Image (spheres, rainbow, N blue to C red):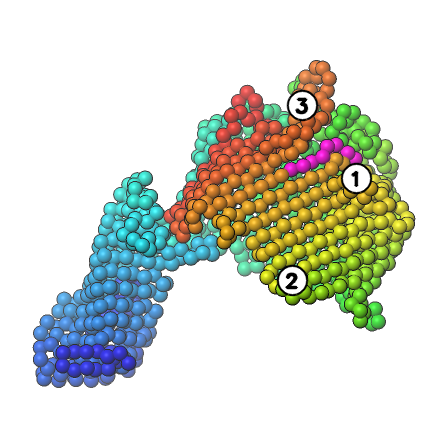
Amino acid sequence: MPLSVTGRETRPRQRLGHGLRTVSDIAKLAGLLAFVSGAALTLGSDGASAQAAGQSDRGQARKAAAPKSAVAPKAAAQPAPAPTGKPAERLLVEAAELIYDNDNNTVTARGNAELHYGPRTLQADRVRYDRASSRVFAEGNVRLTDETGAVVTGDTMELTDDFRNGFVDALRIQQTVEMRGQPVRTRFSAPRGERVDGEQTTFESGTYTACEPCKNNPETPPLWQVRAAKIIHNNETHIIGFEESTLEIAGIPVGYLPYFEAPDPTVKRKTGFLTPRFITSTALGSGISTPFFINVAPNFDITLTPSFLSEQGILGQGELRHRLDTGTYTIRASGIFQTTPSAFLPGPLGAGDRDFRGSIETTGQFYINDRWRTGWDVVGVTDKWFLDNYRVRNSSITTDYFREAVSTAYLIGQGDRSWFEARAYYFKGLSSYDWQKEQPVVAPVIDYDKRINGPGFLGGEVRFEANITHLDREATDFQAIPRTGSYYFNPTVNGTTYSLYETCTTFTRSTCIIRGLSGSNTRASAQLSWRRTFIDDAGQVFTPFAYLRTDAFFVDPRNSGYQNALAQTISTTDSDFSGRVMPAVGLDYRYPFVSNFGPLGVHTLEPIAQVVIRPSETHIGRLPNEDAQSLVFDDTSLFEWDKFSGYDRVEGGVRTNLGAQYSVVTPSGWYANVMFGESIQVAGVNSFRRGDLANVGLDSGLERRESDYVGRFQLSPNQNISFVTRARFEQRDFTVNRLETGVIARLNPFAPIDLSMFYSYYAAQPLLGFNNRREGLTASATYHITPNWFVTGSALVDLTHYLDVRDNFANAYTSYLANPVGAAPVYTNPGRANLAGLSIGGGYQDECTTFSLNYIVSPTAAALGVTERNRTVLLRVELKTLGEVDLRQNVNIASTADGIAATR
């Protein structure tokens, strides 16, 4: 046990209880612990007054016999009595020694004094209580930790007798808060601080930062700090006010505000203004958005964002978020009465004929119980250009090239081995190529999936799947193959002819694809399947399987009202009901050969063979195909029972799938895998040779009896490097028809570099609308100059000029139709490489600061209808706990976006 040494005697270190002579003495010292938190002081326990009186009597007797100054040993701490009605709380004091100065009427705890009162702890070299002035002093390395974990340090602390007012010299406060799941440590400091009424702390000539001090030189100014003549921190309202404040970067002043205030770091939500956003646009002019956040309740808030635009007036935006016991919902709305509608083209190519434009979106998700939930994501817009023209954020917009806003509502249930989902969809086309009457309304889409153990001797797994889909479309969705001989429907608006959407005068597979038929289409599908795996003594793996698929279709075509070709050339004009049944049996066989070569790893060679026996598919081309248009034949689909991606098509005939894979896993962490195979149509009609209205199956690599070869190669020397290649080769001459290869690598510890590179090649598929090959390369790299500084860059190379050719042809054809002079443009591809996208930048990141600057060149989305690249500068600065600024500036020299008048 540590010892306390005085001038004449050595005493064991003990808990202090009897050294303080009255309840008031204990209370005065304990109250010091409430200095920062301002907590009410409650001490003692019931029935302790007699003990306190006894302590006082012994103290008086000691006073009569002792010299003017005495040193008392420490003893076990005892609970002190508390005022009537106050809850009990123990005060524990540790110190090397306790000194009574009876002449000066003081009591001093000296030598690593440590006081524990509830969740608060005070540490100091010396703590002195002056009974005459009713003041308490803590001196030397004073450190106070409150119940929140905040640490207050100073050279001295001085408190008044009610412990709600006082001063601290060389004040420093440190507190850890959480931001985005990461701890951030904040720091206040001042030569002197004052506390008033236990609620407000004032820092004279104070500083605030979230940066760690330099380890080698703590006196060096932090990366950033706010220095103010006065910092006022109100612990009740949790607001920090800065008077005559200056923002310093590395000790250099860079900004000044006479006064500003912000919530302290403990506040997660607070009513007030958010970071403004600046706007510059040809059609909108210059402007600023000023978001104002309203914290209605802990589970309910509203954000109002007026945007003041020099060309168009005031754009109003609002967002409401509400979290309830069973779920949450949001409502986001925006709108503007345009002061200069002529800045945009008139309809149908723009919204220049509209005074009011706006949008509304609502999302929600609610849990009915632990198995069922329901929700929605619904968006409505006045026109398809609004979200882009006014840069309105919307979560329902798809991010692919042909953008659309998808509205959906759903009901989902999940059991231990079952799944139910019912949805409805509405698609709003946002591309310049979209005609809304070609977009379907899909309601409902119902899916059910249930798996159970096979009964009795069958064993294995039995699975039941069902799907019901109904959709309506006003006009047939045509896609003309881009070549001379394709025809467009061109309405006249204000005497000018425009190309709005594609059509075909006569439907032929070489010139036109039909993505969806007009009218009402309903399909109900069900599939019952069984499979079971057997492994014999030799290690051979046999998996027999069987399934029965049934489909019922009801088609009600709509063939009049629009001049987009006669649907009679495709289907009948009468309502039609038809059915389809597809039974199948099959066997999957695998025989893995495994060898362990010690340090060279475990090697596995696995031949695979699969046969599926079923009748031929019926009604090919006579039934709509809405959900099975995405057919990709590669290593991932080689051993699928049915290679179509949806229910509208079903694979038929007898087919054999053959392949093998080889893998290696070493003790050092190496992993490699090679797979190769092909598919053979043995008997019956090849479903992929008979293309439907969308030509699905043609140019897929499966349309011949012997398919293309497919393969995969994966290599991962360690957890930092991953390489994968997938390819499809022409069966007759091994020509590459599809190739995707990429590598992701972190070169640490050899070099502070992260890099990735992906290359893709797709051969021409003229029957699917791709007359030329598509080939591209994307690469990105980040170099960490130091643990904090980095530079980064990426590039997208269009190796065949495909993107430019596609957009140039569409725009050239539209211009020709507006002024049909000379010959119509022909879809050609020069095959030149083109830098389609570029990003370069750099930044800095540490525990308190994030900074990044990027220059980005990217392909323009189809929704904008322009061929020029987007050129944008992005600047982001975040001073953690203080705020962040995001600036985005378009630096195109000239840009005419779809819906924006060229004269502006």
| Residue matched to label 3 | 812
Q: Mark 1 belongs to which amino acid?
A: Asp
Whether residue 142 is visible, yes or no, is yes
Residues under labels 1 and 3: Cα distance?
28 Å
SS type, badge 3: helix
Q: Looking at the rendered structure, which numbered label has been put on residue 699?
A: 1
Mark 1 Cα shell of 10 Å, populated few (<14), some (14-19), many (≥20): some
Residue 281 x %, y %: 50, 29
Q: Which residues are magenta?
A: 766-776
Mark before the other along the chain sequence, 1 or 3:
1
Residues under labels 1 and 2: Cα distance?
42 Å
Mark before the other along the chain sequence, 3 or 2:
2
Q: Are marks 1 and 2 in contact (CB under 8 Å)?
A: no
Q: Nearer the viewer, mark 1 or mark 3?
A: 1
Q: Is residue 901 above or below residue 98?
A: above
Residue drawn at x 66%, y 45% is: 741
Q: Mark 2 belongs to which amino acid?
A: Leu
Of 798 and 368, the residue lying toward us: 798
Q: Nearer the viewer, mark 1 or mark 2?
A: 2
Residues under labels 3 and 2: Cα distance?
60 Å
Residue 89 x %, y %: 32, 74
627 inside magenta stretch:
no
| Residue matched to label 2 | 600
Mark before the other along the chain sequence, 1 or 2:
2
